[in-house]
Each structure stands twice: as C-alpha cells, then as structure tokens.
Amino acid sequence: MAVQQMSVTMTGFAASNPSRSDAVPNLTTFRMASTPSWKDNGVWKDGGTLFIEVQCWGRLADHVLPSVVKGAPLVIAGRMTSYTYVPGEENCRRNRDGDPVPETVWRLTASNVGLDLSHSPSTWSLKDRPRKADREGDQDGQERAREALEAAGYGSYGGSFTSDGADTDLAPGADSAEVGGGNGAEVGGGSGSGSGGGSGPEGQDAPGEQQYAATGGESTPF
C-alpha cells in the first residue's frame, strides 16, 4: 500500500452528515465533494468531482458533529493523504486482462473546518461555557472577578455575531469597562490593553479567558 501526504486548503460541499462511532469517540468523519471550476470564453465549466474522506479529531470533532450538515459549503485545512489498495473479490474491478484494479482513497485529516461564505451569508453564536483556570490556584481570583463583573452588570457573556461584523448584545451597553487612555480592563490578574472612549468602573477584574475591547461605546469580547 502506497501512502503520500501534503498540507492543503480545500473548498467543497459536505457529501454526508458527520458521524462518529463508539469505538473511537474522539473521531468525527464525513465525506466532502470538491469540484474544480474555471471560465472558458466567459462560460463557467466544471471538472471532475473528487470525493474525500474528512477526519476530525479531539475538540474539532466535538464541534463539527453538531455543526456540519450534508450540503454545507466548507473550507477545510489539513493534511491530505492518499493510499491505494486492492478491494476484495466481490468489490474488485478488473482490467481487460482480468487483473484486479487498485483503488485510490483520499483522506483529509482536518486541522480547521469553516463555512465558505462565498456561497451564502451565515451567523455565528457565542455560547456561555464553563471557564477553566489558566493556572493552578486561580480559581478564587476568577470567582472574585466574576462577582465584580456581575456587580457591574456584565454577568456571564453570550450573544451572536453576524457575517457583516455588526455589534451585538455582548455587553450591558455604554457603561463598559474603561479601556480609554491606554488603560485596559485587568484580565486574570494581568494587565490588558485596548483603545476607545468607553467609560465606567475602573479596577475590576475580568475572567481569565475573557477580554473586552471598546467598540462604538460598547464592550465586545475578542
């Protein structure tokens, strides 16, 4: 069996819904169809369609499973591998001489999976999730930071972003943490940085994994 691999970024459409097996719970797989196209005398033409097996591991696998659906336009970066094998007698194709014909399989081990917005707009939602301490011993400091943030009206974060970059309800409003004048909201016991003319309570700690920047008088996480 011959194996070759290369790093690639590919576009295409999901040809199946993602799935995972109980035997390998940290692996999500699906098929992608990629068809090259070009203009010939002002007319778009399509080449042959390449079907690829996409493998996603770990946290990417957890996110891809509920997010990707069959037919979704995708941009995928990762490591492409091709290998050849001879199928069993029942599924084997043969040439004119009656010899088995080897089959080639293309597999893309993904490092990044995203939507291809050249086909249609989309939205993205930021959901609240449990925060982990950046280092051992930070739990108490983060708890105090959350209490201070809630007292200022922030509470836990949540909201959604649109594809045109419009601001959304990720902060309580104009009473944002002060980041103007070169001073940043203190993050996880460290010092942050930012710009803008927001005004509000000074010296309040923010959670270790969440930073804020002033945008048009509102604070949005980045």
Image (cartoon, rainbow, N blue to C red):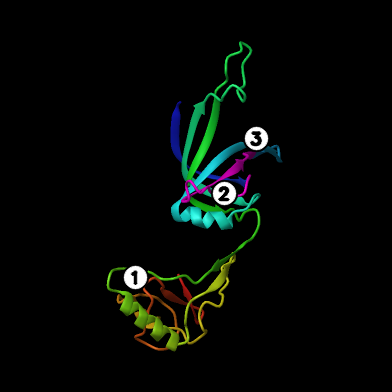
Of the numbered discs 2 and 3, the one sitting upstream in the chain is 2
- Which residue type carries mark 2? Ser
Quarter of the C terminus within the rendering? bottom left
Quarter occupied by residue 52: top right
Can residue 178 be seen in the rendering of this structure?
no
Between marks 3 and 1 in the image, the one whose residue lies nearer the viewer: 1
Give how far across and how far down residue 14 sits, in percent.
61, 47
Query: Relative to the observer, which residue lies in front, 76 or 167?
Result: 76
Disc 2 is placed on an element classified as loop
Depth order, front residue of 182/189: 189
**Does 34 lie within the magenta span?**
yes
Instruction: Residue 201 in the image: state x and y as whole percent.
Output: 40, 89
Question: Depth-wise, is mark 2 or mark 3 nearer the camera?
Answer: 2
Magenta residue span: 15-37
Check residue 137 for magenta coloring: no
Residue at the location (58% across, 14% down)?
99
Residue 12 visible? The answer is: yes
Q: Amino acid at mark 1?
A: Ala
* Residue 210 placement, left or right of 118: left
Q: Are marks 2 and 3 in contact (CB under 8 Å)?
A: no
Prevailing SS of the magenta stretch? loop
Q: Nearer the viewer, residue 112 or 85?
A: 85
Give the residue at mark 2. Answer: 19
Q: Residues within 10 Å of mark 3 (few under 14, many from 20)?
A: few
In this view of the protein, which residue sits in the foreground, 198 or 81? Answer: 81
The residues tagged by marks 2 and 1 sit, at their Cα atoms, a distance apart of 32 Å
Cα distance between the residues tagged 2 and 3: 28 Å
| Type of the residue with mark 3 | Gly
Give the secondary structure at mark 1. loop
Name the residue tied to disc 3. Answer: 47
Q: Which residue is mark 1?
A: 133
From mark 3 to mark 1, how far is it between C-alphas?
50 Å
